[in-house]
Amino acid sequence: MFRSAFAAVAVLALAACSGRKSELAVESPGLESQARISHEAARKTARAQVPGGEIESAELEEEDGRLVYSFDIDDEGDGIVEVLVDARSGEVVSRTVETAAQEKAESEADEKAEEADEPGERED
């Protein structure tokens, strides 16, 4: 699990350095080979859900037993719209608007989960 979290962070860091925020992070190895829909096709589907929005992040992950592309799209003032696209059928699974407070809470929870996965230094 640590490796997948590290890989996702590395992909996002590289995307941030290159100025391209919408690179695909993959939750765990092997998921890409299970997807029938390409990342680009899923991106087009997600962007159609939020016209004019900017994709902030993209991830291929398993959620509730379903393989999905998850896109966080900045909707210019309305918050972040999370669009889930089924990676096998290409259908939109859900479209959820997250307020800035919800996005911050989710980000903090993700950071805590990543810290829990990292081997800690033991203080004696």
Image (tube, rainbow, N blue to C red):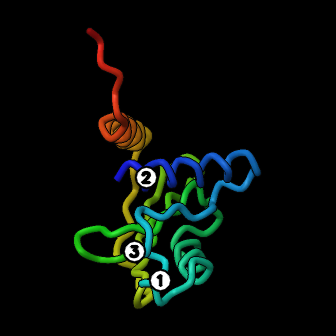
| Residue occupied by mark 3 | 68
Name the quadrant containing residue 29.
bottom left
| Residue occupied by mark 2 | 3
Q: Residue at x 65, y 64 (%)?
A: 52
Front label number (2 vs 1): 2
Front label number (1 vs 3): 1
Q: Earlier in the sequence, mark 2 or mark 3?
A: 2
In the image, is residue 117 above or below residue 45? Answer: above
Q: Earlier in the sequence, mark 2 or mark 1?
A: 2
Q: Residue at x 59, y 54 (%)?
A: 11
- Cα gap from disc 2 to disc 3, whole angstroms: 20 Å
- Cα gap from disc 1 to disc 3, whole angstroms: 13 Å
The C terminus, quarter of image: top left
| Residue occupied by mark 1 | 33
Residue 22 spot, x, y in % from top left: 63, 60
Residue 79 spot, x, y in % from top left: 48, 48
Residue 115 spot, x, y in % from top left: 36, 34
Q: Is residue 101 visible?
A: no
Q: Residues within 10 Å of mark 3 (few under 14, many from 20)?
A: many
Give the amino acid type for the residue marked by disc 2 in the picture. Answer: Arg
Residue 46: mark in rendering: none
In the image, is residue 105 above or below residue 120? Answer: below
In the image, is residue 107 above or below residue 84? Answer: above
Front label number (2 vs 3): 2
Q: Can residue 58 be seen in this view?
A: yes
- Secondary structure beneath dot 1 equals helix
